[in-house]
Image (cartoon, coloured by chain):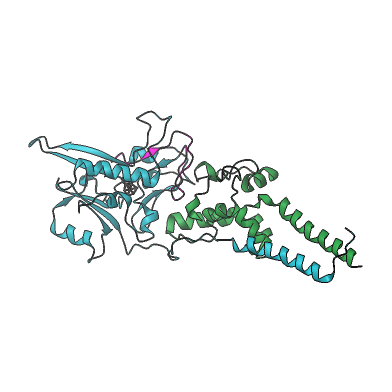
Chain colours: A cyan, B green
Amino acid sequence: MNKALNRRDFIKIMNATTTGVAIVASGITLTTFASVSETPVTNKKRWGLLIDTNKLTETDIDGMVNACQQEQGWGTEIRSTSSQKPGWIKKLKIKDKATNKVSNLALMCQHCEEPPCVDVCPTNASMKREDGIVLVDKHLCIGCRYCMMACPYDARSFVHETLNNQKEHMPRGKGTVEACTMCVHKVDKGETPACVESVNSEAVIFGNLYDESSQINQTLKIVQSSQIRADLNLNTGVRYSGI
Amino acid sequence: MNRFLVVFLSLLVSSVFAYIDEYANLGEQASSIKASGKVFHESPSIIRKMHPEFLRHKRDKTLRQGIRTNEYSLKGCVSCHANKNKINNQYYSVDKQGQFCSDCHKKVGVSFDCFSCHRTVLREDLL
Ligand code: SF4
Ligand code: SF4
């Protein structure tokens, strides 16, 4: 300890210290997100789905349900009874009583233009975006479940248990209602909903209903399609052909 | 004379590190930004006071208008203020005791329930 450090040694030490800090500093990688729009969505677009029940096999529907679970993180609830478990998209069998023809449907939130779920919600948590996607704002949802009663398609579920490890793009929590979001987090990035991606054939088409050049718009012009419970006049964003 | 200078300066340097240590809880990225001398938030006092409003504004814009920008996003907060367990290399839940959000909330006695719905563990590939 007798050896006094001269100025040069001191600078050396200081340099070593500074380098240490610089290494720490260069380790910073700031979080980057995919490029996103900074302007609000408008009613110039209306997102929709066209499901061709003739082309859609049962395996396809199972694949869609699976893809939705993977993407959105529902379906691993362990404490809920089977009637309590969420179901954002369901496989439905319908039979024509006269002809006995059986069709398989994939049924999710129909993203109604006049959504009864939004009408009855006392807190404004059920809401429709300008581009037609119907969502639940879980920050405002008080869990009253009026929307579940009002929905003619049984499209919504209620979370009955404490959850963790949710998908970072899909917060879900006990005491709130949830339903198909039309994979809004993907759509906003210009991508396609997970269930649509999972089907290889053209059995499910996603797109902008208002855009004359979109595949969904053009197909709807040439094929016979229907809304489920069209008599309710909800003008659904999800359409079916082949039934 | 030189000797005193060294002692003085090394005390100064070590006190800087002690200061950083004290705020180890800030989160890994946040700590290295702080150590690098960069300023991330316009003013810590504003962010301390206003972060609920910023987050509320941002969440409404994201959910209702589809504006998914980075600024004031909860994902951004978490990815910067999260800490890793050095032993098993896993991220701690941000709402656990000793972590940035929960520590401060506990200190000021304000409960928060963001993380009853939002994911608590930082996803590695988000960084
Ligand atoms: S299908 Fe049900 S949940 Fe979806 S918008 Fe229509 S009423 Fe609301
Ligand atoms: S659009 Fe997304 S949320 Fe809706 S059923 Fe398909 S995968 Fe599920």
Locate the N terminus of chain A by quadrant: bottom right
Locate the C terminus of chain A by quadrant: top left
Does residue A179 appear to the left or right of A242 in the view shown?
A: right
Question: Which residue lies most toward the bottom here?
Answer: A8
Residue B115: image location, x then y, percent: 54, 44
Question: Which residue lies most toward the left here?
Answer: A99
Q: Nearer the viewer, residue A232 or B13?
A: B13
Highlighted range, magenta: A153-175
With respect to residue A20, does A181 lie above or below? Answer: above
Q: Residue at x 38, y 43 (%)?
A: A120
Q: Nearer the viewer, residue A128 or B75?
A: B75
Residue A194: image location, x then y, percent: 32, 50
Question: Which residue lies most toward the right here?
Answer: B1
Q: Is residue A152 visible?
A: no
Does residue A163 appear to the left or right of B4 in the view shown?
A: left
Q: Residue at x 43, y 59 (%)?
A: B65
Residue A231: image location, x then y, percent: 20, 45
Main SS category, magenta section: loop
Query: Quadrant of the rendered structure where residue B18 is?
Result: bottom right
With respect to residue A183, does A92 lie above or below? Answer: above
Q: Nearer the viewer, residue B18 or A138?
A: B18
Q: Residue at x 33, y 55 (%)?
A: A132
